[in-house]
Image (cartoon, rainbow, N blue to C red):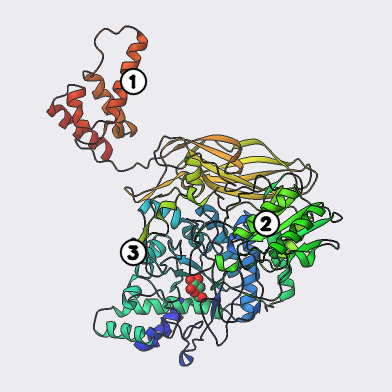
Amino acid sequence: MSKQEIWEIVKKMTLEEKAALCSGRDFWHLEGFERLGVPSVMVSDGPHGLRKQDDKADHLGVNDSIKAVCFPAGCATACSFDEELPERLGRTLGRECRAENVSVLLGPAINMKRSPLCGRNFEYYSEDPFLAGKTAAAFVRGVQSWQVGVSVKHFAANNQEFRRMSGSSNMDERTLREIYLAAFETAVKEARPWTLMCSYNRINGVFASENRKLLTDILREEWGFDGYVMSDWGAVNVRTDALRAGLELEMPGPCPENDAELVQAVRSGDLDEAVLDQAAERILDVVFRYCGAQVPQAVFDREADHKIAVELEKECAVLLKNDGLLPLSRGAKLAYLGGFAARPRYQGGGSSHINASRVSSALSCAPDGVIYEEGFPADRDVIDEAAFARAVQAAKEADAAVIFAGLPDSFESEGYDRQHMRLPDCQNELIRRVLAVQKRVVVVLHCGSPVETPWADEASSVLCVYLGGEGVGEATDALLYGDANPCGRLAETWPMKLEDNPSYLNFPGCEEGVNYAEGVFIGYRYYDKKKMPVRWPFGHGESYTGFAYSNVRLSAGTLADGGEVTVLVDVTNTGARAGKEAVQLYVADRTGTPGRPEKELKGYVKLALEPGETKTAQFTVNARSLSWYSEALGDWYAAPGQYELLVAHSSRDVRGSVSLAFSTEKRLPLRVHRNTTIGALLADPRTAPILKAAMSRGKPLFGGEEQESAAAEAITEEMSRQMMVNAPLRAAQLFLGMSRGEIEALITELQRAVDG
Ligand code: BGC
């Protein structure tokens, strides 16, 4: 339907009808108007399966929904480091939505993993906005290829569950832009999602649902978003303020009081009716994108989609450690221990909870002859000495033990955060006792977020299947025995212990809010800067084969603002098995700009390689890849100078690098006054030559007198230079013997040079 036709409908709507359209008809439907030919369409959770509910609706995953397919959760999907995978997941979900007549899927959920404790980390992608943004964009392209909308959520800075409906996420503009908005920016600009869902929380004191800066200035005006924004379920505070700020749809409905508030606000002149018209038009536009689409007949084939769930999980699981015990031989005498072998935890709790059509366990797939002892249950933290003894005995008698561990449902869910980062004590204790009698131990972890692994050095192999969806059993089996070669890479750092995490001193904050005091230094940006040991770094993942990097090269050694260069690297499979390598590109600022991370992910590509085969990974780098967000400039900025482009197997395993010289006409704003530092003026190419000339005319603080040697003279000069760098311009009076008048004249000259 054309814009004009939609506006024709809006014109025919009464004030009351327009207000009613801007809130849900019920928990999952938008309002429809038969007389105007506007159907009532359905939305459903999301993100890793279809949670379509009928009459008993809820947003906590309590009541049943239709039988569907549970795919790997976001924590796993992002580990694919492969845009093709989330896109395929999206295409599958888009088809399911079409078949079930769902117009918008409520996902992807793409908030940053600031603390490992956030209860919803299992739904989210990463601690890195580049990875989260690209993964999200691919997912959105996939779903929307079926002309079904998505709702990218939760916009924005919803990084904890503690006081999620009232707390304020407080941070500076640079942190907001570089870390907490960047993934949304990528998703919006690259994939044009039909809708976004605002978060519950406040940002710097202002509710996300009433945040004009976020919902209108940035989202629409800067990024060009052209769909509608819906509220998270119950996130509206004051309805009129929310509409004015740019929140079109309030969910869930019905909301008769808030609808009446809008009508009243228009009648009293408090709200311009044009704002309501605009919101109605945006909602109708998306409704008709869905209803008017010409798409092939869609079928929800649960059997076929279960197979897709298995295939996806094989590409997402991360082999954290392997001293050669894996892959196992199907003929070996093996003991499977731990309740997760029979009852894997494959999804998280809350609104994303899927009524899975069938779930496979590693035990149900295991080869004949495998001995199973539960040892500890999957859902509680209890030590049963008799069960422990049987498990330890089975481990002792076997060639190797595979312990299926993980976080019970109650440890990790939407609605609350984790209290600590440990596995249940019973699990650590059984692993410890088994390791005392059996050196060949594989630990398989089922969790939505990192856990402390005090036994990591002793275990032979550790495979993290995250929350791998309903096909996790088949996928785990294939990975353990080498029918599939692990190729997932960590989308988040696994710290040694919780206290190492950069948010530790400011998580979860207090009643009013939480200060993101670590700024842009989240995840590996922090651990790398601090040169801290971590258990497993961002980007890490082992394989049953090896990869060699060679011949790193650049299409050009210089980059001018507005252009782009290509980085290329050859990667060879050096082992005997086919495998996939996620080649990563990081950028390191070598211009001397303070406050920048050691390196930041700016590209990744997954290569499938047969034994002996070589392929070339290729990345595009532009000014934005080098940039940080300058609040003073109100824009992204990269200083002119040198950057290093690192090709890497993980954030801590750099395999090669090339240097790039960047040039730009963009300059940071600079106001020259008596207290501008000499250092700042020397760092700026516009002012440096003028100041240097003035300084060479002045009488230096030290020197002049006879020095013992040339070396002593050099030291004195260097000390003088360093002191001067930190001094304000007015100190030139003292350091250089300049008069007050000369300094005033110099300020004028410098400012003129800045202003051009
Ligand atoms: C969650 C959303 C979800 C909505 C509907 C809310 O509690 O935060 O992610 O889409 O419920 O179930």
Using a 10 Å C-alpha cutoff, classify the residue at mark 1 as few (fewer than 14 neighbours), some (14 to 19) or many (20 or more): few
Q: Which residue is mark 1?
A: 718
Question: Pointers 2 and 1 in contact (CB under 8 A)?
Answer: no
- Residue 716, percent across and down? 31, 16
Image quadrant holding the C terminus, namely top left
Could you tell me which residue is drawn at 28 percent across and 31 percent down? 726
Secondary structure, mark 2, is: helix
Q: CA distance from mark 2 to mark 3?
A: 41 Å
Apparent side of residue 90 relative to residue 754 in the rendered image (left or right): right
Q: Which residue is mark 2?
A: 430
Callout 3: CB less than 8 Å from ligand 1: no
Callout 1: CB less than 8 Å from ligand 1: no
Q: Which residue is mark 3?
A: 512
- Residue 539, percent across and down? 60, 48
Which amino acid is tagged 2? Leu
Q: CA distance from mark 3 to mark 1?
A: 49 Å
Question: Pointers 2 and 3 in contact (CB under 8 A)?
Answer: no
Q: Quadrant of residue 698?
A: top left
In terms of depth relative to the viewer, which is nearer, 723 or 660? 723
The disc at residue 619 is none
Which amino acid is tagged 1? Glu
Res. 212 in view: no
Compared to residue 65, the image places residue 394 above or below, namely: above
- Comes first in the chain, label 3 or label 1: 3
Q: How many marks?
A: 3
Compared to residue 756, the image places residue 544 above or below, namely: below
Which amino acid is tagged 3? Glu
- Residue 29, percent across and down? 50, 83
- Comes first in the chain, label 2 or label 3: 2
In terms of depth relative to the viewer, which is nearer, 371 or 286? 371
